[in-house]
Image (cartoon, rainbow, N blue to C red):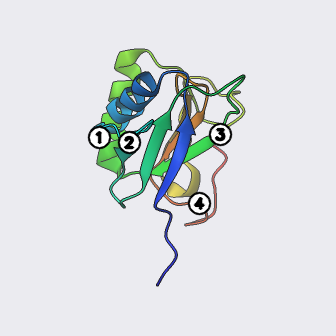
Amino acid sequence: MAVELNHTIVAARDRRESAEFLAHVLGLEVGTPWGPFLPVVVSNGVTLDFADGWPGEIASQHYAFLISEEEFDAAFARIEAAGITYWADPHGQQKNEINHHWGGRGLYFKDPAGHGMEIITRPYGSQPPTDS
């Protein structure tokens, strides 16, 4: 059997707020709660199980989503319409810009819990990166 990522738990201050935020940006649905988890399933079957009730600070994690050019256009429009701050780089130096690495487009944004979210249209290393 091939090894596949099946699911991951995403720490949240408010699981509904975080799940709905990501589902809205990516054009996905929030699933039915299961125990302490509120799932968002992506097209390759991986589930992000949002869970709240974490004691103390939530350690920021990074989640990157490979999407089509058309899905990028739609997600980008939703990001702009919602007034979500985004960056072309993971360090937040290129505010309100997108990148064109590997011949595609990409951007970074934060979810309500402070996790770093990324959308890209080309997988890393698919062709030499550009400077923009």
**Circles 2 and 3: CB distance less than 8 Å?**
no
Amino acid type, label 4: Tyr
Q: Residue 31 carries which label?
A: 1
Q: Distance between the residues labelled 1 and 2?
A: 5 Å
Mark 1 Cα-neighbour bin, 10 Å: few <14, some 14–19, many ≥20: some
Tag 2 residue:
39
**Circles 1 and 4: CB distance less than 8 Å?**
no
**Circles 1 and 2: CB distance less than 8 Å?**
yes
Label 4 SS? loop
Which sits in the foreground, 27 or 96? 27
Which sits in the foreground, 43 or 123? 43
Q: Which mark is residue 99?
A: none
Label 2 SS? strand
Which residue lies most toward the bottom here? 1
Q: Residue 124 carries which label?
A: 4
Can you give x and y, in whole percent of width and height, for residue 42 in the image?
A: 36, 51
Amino acid type, label 1: Gly
Q: How far apart are marks 4 and 3 (CA)?
A: 18 Å
Residue 110 placement: quadrant = top right
* Residue at point 47%, 49% (across, down): 65
